[in-house]
Image (tube, helix red, strand yellow):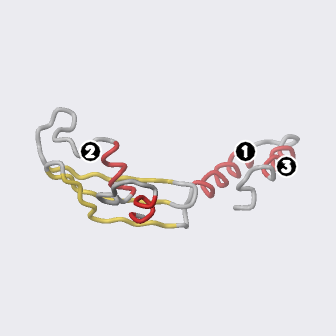
Amino acid sequence: MAACGAAAGFDVLQVLSEPTAVAIAHRADEASVNGATGTLKRCVVVDLGASGLDVAVMTVNRGVISVDAHEHTDALSGEKYHSASFLLLASLIEWPFRPFVMAFKRTLPWHDVGG
């Protein structure tokens, strides 16, 4: 990753993991949360992406973010979640509209996931 950045002409100082980047983007490294003045915080970052689910537990202490645990699974992904939601909603639709809804399912990019 650093080599790609260097090849593009960037001065790469450090490569961050996605959960750390999310924590920084949401200003988790700032000293206070909702007016509290404590310096130690615990954060949980959950990312339900198209290809999988990522969960990270992080500690923020005086502006320094450390990842305590990180797990990724392909068993639950955004595409599978969308497919399951669609099938649930389609099962609630009464005849005569159900065949139309199930035919529409085949036009979606995740149509082959699930029943």
Which tag, 1 or 2, sits closer to the chain's start? 2
- Give the image location of residue 91, x and y in percent: 74, 49
Amino acid on which disc 2 is placed: Ala
For the residue labelled by badge 3, is the local secondary structure a helix, a strand or a loop?
Answer: helix
Mark 1 sits on what residue? 92
Residue 85 lies, in percent from the top left, at 64, 49
Q: Tag 3: Cα neighbours inside 10 Å, few (<14), some, or many (≥20)?
A: few
Q: Earlier in the sequence, mark 1 or mark 3?
A: 1
**Residue holding disc 3:** 103
Please, what secondary structure does the residue beneath circle 1 have?
A: helix
Label 2 residue SS: loop
Nearer the observer, 84 or 13: 13
Number of residues whose C-alpha sits closer than 10 Å to that of mark 1, classed few (under 14), some (14–19) or many (20 or more): few
Q: Quadrant of residue 5?
A: bottom left
Q: Report the residue at 45% width, 53% height from top.
A: 47
Task: Answer few, some or many: residues within 10 Å of disc 2's Cα (few below 14, many 20 plus, some between 14 and 19).
Answer: many
Q: The C terminus lies in which quarter of the figure?
A: bottom right
Closest to the camera, between mark 1 and mark 3, is: 3
Q: Which residue is mark 2?
A: 28
Amino acid at the residue labelled 3 = Ala
20, 114: nearer the viewer: 20
Q: CA distance from mark 3 to mark 2?
A: 45 Å
State which tag comes first along the sequence, 3 or 2.
Answer: 2
